[in-house]
Image: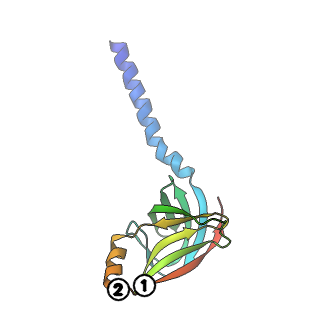
Amino acid sequence: MRTFTKVSARLFAAVLAAASLAPVAQAQNRSFVARITVPFAFEVSSGRQLNPGVYDISVSGGQTMVIRGTNSAALAMIWQQANVGLPISHGKAVFTHYGDKYYLRSISVTGSSTRLLFAQSKHERESAVASGKSTSSVDVALLQTGR
């Protein structure tokens, strides 16, 4: 009985140790997607506000995009992956613009036929209601792409 308890405790400790390393391994396996210079402050689907600057964008876990700048980072949940047919010739990020606010709407990467679409944040939904139908889109070219 005592041996069984020791083995169970060791097995539990090994599983716990392996589970704690899983996020680290996943973070190291992120695939690089793009780099972008955004000339204005913007918000992502998680509600996080980001300042103007250069950002590296990567996909983590298939449904999450990580946006990392020099002084800030954010997660954006990928709402939908739209197949646009032919591979995209020029990568871009599309921002929806309401008044003086910008919201990341989608990203298209050079050489891919998939466009990543992002859900609206709570603030974006509120801005859309407040502005009525006055909205516009702003395209920002991706500087560098890779996988």
Location of residue 79 in the rendering, given as x and y in whole percent from the top left corner: 45, 62
Please say if 32 is above or below 51. above
Q: Amino acid at mark 2?
A: Ser
Observer-nearest of 11 and 43:
43
Asked whether residue 70 is in view, the answer is no
Secondary-structure class at tag 2? helix
Which residue appears at 43% of the width and 41% of the height? 20
Observer-nearest of 102 and 71:
102
Asked whether residue 7 is in view, the answer is yes
Location of residue 5 in the rendering, given as x and y in whole percent from the top left corner: 34, 18
Considering the image in quadrants, where does the N terminus appear? top left
Secondary-structure class at tag 1? loop
Q: Amino acid at mark 1?
A: Thr
Please say if 110 is above or below 21. below
Which residue appears at 37% of the width and 19% of the height? 6
Q: Which mark is residue 70?
A: none
Q: Are marks 2 and 1 in contact (CB under 8 Å)?
A: yes
Question: What is the CA distance from the residue labelled 2 to the residue labelled 1?
Answer: 7 Å
Name the residue carrying label 1: 135
Which residue appears at 51% of the width and 70% of the height? 106
Please say if 14 is above or below 45. above
Considering the image in quadrants, where does the C terminus appear? bottom right
Q: Residue furthest top?
A: 1
Observer-nearest of 50 and 98:
98
